Amino acid sequence: MIAESSQGGVLLGVLGWRLVRLIETHSDQLARGLLDRIENSEHCREFVQKVPPEDLKQKVYEIYQHLGQWLLKKTEHDVEQRYIAIGERRAAQGVPLSQLMFVIVATKEHLWEYVTKEAMADRPVQLFQELELFQLVEQFFDRAVYFAAIGYERYQSAATRMVGNQEKHSWPGWTRIAPR
């Protein structure tokens, strides 16, 4: 099976699809492995304290489980919506932006390490097809980082405006009395 772009060019060869299916089949194992990696990383202390483990595991599992769709069928708008929502949620939870970015990059690295171990890149054609898959994965996670940062910044901007509005409507030293 070979996926084609709208221009008719080949996106993934047989090996690429085999690797995508391998990832999708082992998505639960991959998600658990990533969760362990994040929980044991000194770069994610606050993330681990503020984000429920099942939340992270479920979000990552959904990406790994449907990787073929995310890489080839979902639009940039789909990635934008998902990761803006994630950025906003992590900002609301008080997760530092650097730790959110670290987790997204670690998600990509974890996937690459798994594929590298599993792939048989002993022939140039197979290596080329594997590199095509890596390019699609790289593009997906680069967009994820960008859109998560936008969501995070939107949340911070809205929170700042809300605090500013509260300050405008209160008088220092005066207590507001509700009408009867």
Image (spheres, rainbow, N blue to C red):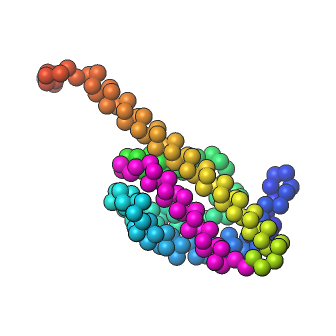
Report the residue at 57% width, 46% height from top: 146
Left/right of residue 46 with respect to residue 37 in the rendered view:
left
Q: Is residue 93 left or right of residue 129?
A: left
Residue 9 to residue 156: above or below? below
Q: Residue furthest right?
A: 8
In this rendering, position of residue 67 left or right of residue 11 = left
Magenta segment, prevailing SS (helix, strand or loop)? helix
Report if residue 65 is visible in the image: no
Seen as rendered, the residue at the extreme front is 42
156 vs 89: above or below: above
Magenta stretch holds residue 147: no
Frontmost residue, 23 versus 128: 128
Relative vertical location of residue 57 with respect to residue 87 in this rendering, above or below: below
Query: Residue at image x 59%, y 68%?
Result: 111
Rendered-image quadrant of the N terminus: bottom right
> Magenta includes 113?
yes
Q: Which of the image's four quarters has the C terminus?
A: top left
Q: Quick check: 1 left or right of 176?
A: right
User: In this view of the protein, which residue sits in the foreground, 63 or 121?
Assistant: 121
Percent of width and height locating residue 176: 16, 23
Q: Which stretch is magenta?
A: 93-120
Q: Quadrant of residue 73?
A: bottom right
In this rendering, the answer to whether 176 lies above or below 114 is above
Q: Quadrant of residue 155?
A: top left
Q: Which picture quadrant has residue 19?
A: bottom right
Q: Residue at x 40, y 46 (%)?
A: 91
